[in-house]
Image (cartoon, rainbow, N blue to C red):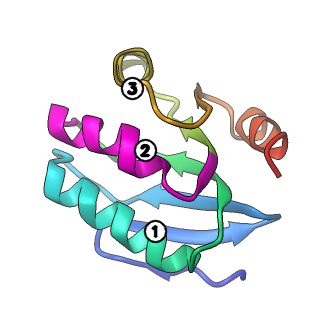
Amino acid sequence: MNDINHTEHANFWIKNEILHCTYKEIKLLDLATAQSIVRDRLQFQQEVSYPVFCDIRNVMSWEKSARDYLAKNGSVLAKAVAIYDDRYIAEVMSKFYLNKNKPLVPSKLFKNYHEAIEFLNNFL
């Protein structure tokens, strides 16, 4: 599966058995948007579990309800999640998310794409 699935809020594709998810520009990620992204991802995956690379650089801010939803429901059919964002403010937000929301699968923030992929390769 190498086709890119373009949805309203994100793009999805599989590369080397890793699901890549790149969020489109989102000023405020609310619960409805988070639910839409997860629904689109699950439909794209067709019941197959993958390590997930998630590029969130285009998300400007997050509602608590969206963070809570993604920590639980965003882990469905994910073996592990590498969150990729090289912005300083995102580092603060993502560390808070990872510590406070406790995702259900191994999840880690990365500023470097290659390190994120190395992390996910452990879950193939």
Q: Nearer the viewer, residue 67 or 73?
A: 73
Q: Nearer the viewer, mark 3 or mark 1?
A: 1
- Secondary structure under the numbered disc 1 in the rendered image: helix
What residue type is disc 3 on? Answer: Ala
Q: Are marks 3 and 1 in contact (CB under 8 Å)?
A: no
Separation of residues labelled 1 and 2 (CA atoms): 15 Å
- Residue under the image location 21 percent in, 36 percent down: 62
Residue 107 shown left or right of residue 17 in the figure: left
Range shown magenta: 61-79
- Secondary structure under the numbered disc 2 in the rendered image: loop
Q: Nearer the viewer, mark 1 or mark 2?
A: 1
Residue 72 shown left or right of residue 64 in the figure: right
Q: Position of residue 57 (x, y in %)?
A: 42, 42
Going from the N terminus, do you reach mark 1 or mark 2 first?
Answer: 1
Going from the N terminus, do you reach mark 2 or mark 3 first?
Answer: 2
Q: Which mark is residue 90?
A: 3
What residue type is disc 1 on? Answer: Arg
Name which quarter of the figure residue 43 lies in.
Answer: bottom left
Main secondary structure found in the magenta portion: helix
Q: Dot 1, crowdedness within 10 Å: few (<14), some or many (≥20)?
A: many
Q: Nearer the viewer, residue 71 or 89?
A: 71
Q: Position of residue 105 (x, y in %)?
A: 57, 37
Q: Are marks 2 and 3 in contact (CB under 8 Å)?
A: yes
- Secondary structure under the numbered disc 3 in the rendered image: helix
Residue named by callout 1: 41
What residue type is disc 2 on? Answer: Ile
